[in-house]
Image: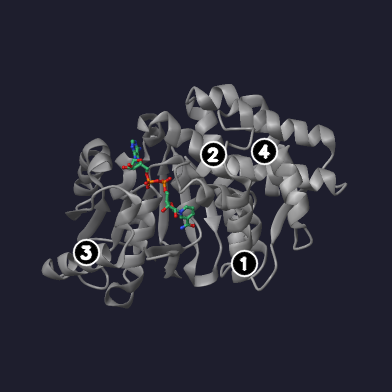
Amino acid sequence: MKKVRLRLGSNSYDICVGSGLLTQTGQQLKKIGFSDRLVIITDPIVKSLYGNTLKQSLASGGFKVIILEVPEGEEQKSLETAARLYSELSSFHTERTTPILALGGGVIGDLAGFVAATYLRGVPLIQIPTTLLAQVDSSIGGKVAVNHGQLKNKIGAFYQPRLVISDINALKTLPGEEFINGLAEVIKSAVVWDKEFFDFLERSLDKIKSLDDRALEEIVFRSARIKAEVVEKDEKDLGLRSILNYGHTVGHAIESALDFKIAHGRAVAVGMLVAGRISNKLGMLDKNELIRLEDVIGRAGLPTAVPNLKLEKVIQAIEHDKKILRGKIRFVLPRAIGEVFITDEVSLSLIEQVLVG
Ligand SMILES: NC(=O)c1ccc[n+]([C@@H]2O[C@H](COP(=O)([O-])OP(=O)(O)OC[C@H]3O[C@@H](n4cnc5c(N)ncnc54)[C@H](O)[C@@H]3O)[C@@H](O)[C@H]2O)c1
């Protein structure tokens, strides 16, 4: 098992990464001082795959377990579902010391995290992410949220978990598309922060895609370490943390232009490439590095071309975001692999030029 310590004073916590960790969860929770009852929030797919293993591990640690189930899907990240969970928690008379374990992907992590942050003004939260995206990104850093109307992820809090347990074995049952989706965030982490990690990805993509244990442990561990380092420096997302939005400005505009009928990771991959090409046109990112970026994205199984869509719609979506940001389009651009900068000096015409290729 590998460990990353995320240091935030009294809110510091460990992120544990390894194979078979679900079976050790009971012991680990005892070690950090929990006993008695706890609540697992999960969805039916994850419950059927991992519910029993986790329950047994918790029972062997002497815990009594309550499982609350939420149907899978982004629609469940809602105030209505949170309200239902509050009622269920109350019907079991859970207390302020009763931890909530979020067992699942980013949807469960965000929703259960939101409930943990708000129920009884905050109960302990343990993140047990089971998708690649959740292990490398969403379970770390304390952003918890639900959606409300057009407000995606906008009703929420910064609420750090007490522990993150990433069992890489869970990645082996993920649908291929979900795994590839998560790889976009892995590549993002390397490009924004760690050139050496990018070299590792280049060398190891085949092993990663064949779900080799050591390769999986390495990508989850290294991405978690990068996210932890960034969050330690900017927990509340007031500056540096926005580098993690690399690929997301254009990525989000593409998702919106395609009515969200494209996977998030695929849209982010295109966004990362567009940002790379913009940087190259501005005389920053070297052509060779741009080619390496394109190569890794393509070999990961992510798109390297802008999908077929109406360009005006992408520009409209970017302009819509621009309005929200008081007239500025903020771009995270790679200066080189492993180093990014933030600028609001990218013109719409340059974006258009790069989008049409
Ligand atoms: N809080 C943050 O910092 C942050 C960051 C990025 C994304 N997010 C959020 O994360 C969410 C997306 O998360 P996601 O990509 O994990 O999707 P998801 O949570 O919807 O999970 C995808 C699907 O995989 C299934 N699944 C989960 N684990 C599995 C496993 N081990 N084997 C087989 N199937 C499994 C789930 O049941 C679900 O159907 C979005 O709501 C997004 O807003 C949050």
Provide residue 328's location: percent of width, then percent of height: 70, 67
Q: CA distance from mark 2 to mark 3?
A: 32 Å
Q: CA distance from mark 2 to mark 1?
A: 27 Å
> What's under tag 4, amino acid-wise?
Phe
Q: Residue at x 67, y 63 (%)?
A: 240
Residue sitting nearer the eye, 297 or 189: 297
For this orientation, the residue located farthest to the left is: 91
Q: CA distance from mark 3 to mark 4?
A: 40 Å
What residue does disc 3 label? 85
Marks 4/2 in contact by CB < 8 Å: the verdict is no
Mark closest to the chain's N terminus, 3 or 4: 3
Is residue 338 shown to the viewer in this render? Answer: no
For this orientation, the residue located farthest to the bottom is: 121
Q: CA distance from mark 1 to mark 4?
A: 22 Å
Mark closest to the chain's N terminus, 2 or 1: 1
Of labels 3 and 1, the one closer to you: 3
Q: CA distance from mark 4 to mark 2?
A: 21 Å
Of labels 2 and 1, the one closer to you: 2
The quarter holding residue 277 reads top right
Mark closest to the chain's N terminus, 3 or 1: 3
Mark closest to the chain's N terminus, 4 or 2: 4
Give the SS element for disc 4. Answer: helix
Q: Which quadrant does the C terminus fall into?
A: top right
Mark closest to the chain's N terminus, 2 or 3: 3
Is residue 94 placed above or below 174 in the rendered structure?
below
Is residue 250 placed above or below 116 in the rendered structure?
above
Q: CA distance from mark 3 to mark 1?
A: 31 Å
Q: Count residues near mark 1 (Cα–Cα under 10 Å), then give few for <14, some for 14-19, many for 20+.
A: some
Q: Count residues near mark 3 (Cα–Cα under 10 Å), then give few for <14, some for 14-19, many for 20+.
A: many
What residue does disc 1 label? 234
